[in-house]
Image (tube, rainbow, N blue to C red):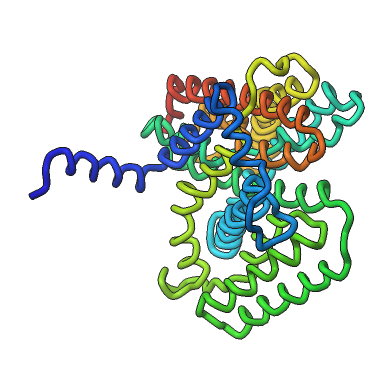
Amino acid sequence: MITPRRQFLSARLRWLHDSEAAPGIVLLIAAAAAMIAANTALEPAYHALLHHPLAWNPVARLTTLHLWINDGLMAVFFFVVGLEIKREVLGGVLANPATRRMPVIAAAAGMAAPAAIYLLIAGNVSGLARGWAIPAATDIAFAMGVVALLGSRVPPSLRLFLLTVAIVDDLGAVAIIALAYTTGIDLAWLGAAGAILGAMLLLARLRIEPAAPFVVLGVALWLAVLHSGVHATVAGVLAAFAIPLRPGRRHHDSLLLRMEHHLVPWNGFVVVPLFGFANAGVVLGGASLLAPLPLGIALGLVLGKQAGIFASLALAERLGIARRPQAAGWLQLWGIALLCGIGFTMSLFIAALAFPADPALIEEAKLGVFAGSLVSALLGYAVLRFARPAPP
């Protein structure tokens, strides 16, 4: 017999699995747990868990749990991002030039403006220019979570627009990681990575559908990229681009769609929360938000994102280059532009790459990311909560 309590728990679990807001909520809980651990008596245990050398380590470069999460587990995150990008480019909203024009313009402007504001504030301080890309990214889990909480107040066209901008934004972030934060290239390992990727592309060309060969080669690709000097997470995106997609076939007939279907829940409820827990533990009171680094990041996220995206939308429509989403008013578009300033996951990830040898600067960067993301989320929610829908 099913008790009322079990029925209640079952209903909550179904909601957690199906709700767009759920991944953002789980990530928020993980980040809050990290903040509590870093600012209480739990701090020594929290630090030891993440940064003490592991007793057994099959990969010499990954000596701590923190490195396994950031360089290993996050490759799965980027693999899922790559699957989503490929699906959208081949058969989704990015397949139609007319449909993708506005999101691409908005995403590009939404990455350039925060970087410009950051460099204006912190770029002249010695060693801080490397952090220019930290406020350029958007956290899709948090942003879509806020939109889900608003329900029908956000029209479907705006949800699709936000999702598309975030996908293009992710692609830009991957390019930045590969080009701007790669040092000390090992040509032998890079050549091995190229050969493995070529083998994966050949399998796709031969229409090989079982997942096992791609999984084995994908792990080998990750190991080769890890040792090449290029950040290991780039291997996730490269591997995803090699997974075959047969446009027009049923869901279970395409390997890419099957993989995406199975991995998205793990990505949202395991990979990203673990990353948040491992990286969100900033010590409050240790740095001032008015210092150049956190201030540049916070203002880049809050001011740069909204200015770049909203201005590009208005200019593109005025010039006739592209049109804004249907049934979306300008106030609603401003709200979406504000939500794009939630940079959390990707911003924290890039901060660790920008200042790998300076934990103090990483702590300052975390403070700026938290402040900018929180203000962007609250302002975006408020604007969308009270914005009237566009007239039909």
Q: Answer whether residue 295 is visible to the viewer in this image.
A: yes
Residue depicted at 88% across the width and 59% down the height: 185
Q: What quarter of the picture does the C terminus occupy?
A: top left
Give how far across and how far down residue 21 sits, in percent.
42, 38
Q: Answer whether residue 98 is visible to the viewer in this image.
A: no
Q: Is residue 83 above or below residue 367?
A: below
The picture quadrant where one finds residue 249 is bottom left
Q: Residue furthest bottom?
A: 206
Q: Is 326 in front, or is 164? A: 164
Q: Is 321 in front, or is 188? A: 188
Residue depicted at 63% across the width and 69% down the height: 218
Give how far across and how far down residue 14 sits, in percent.
29, 47
Give how far across and how far down residue 309 sits, in percent.
66, 33
Residue depicted at 74% across the width and 60% down the height: 226
Q: Is residue 254 above or below residue 307?
A: below
Q: Is residue 108 above or below residue 212?
A: above
Give how far across and how far down residue 169 sits, in percent.
66, 45
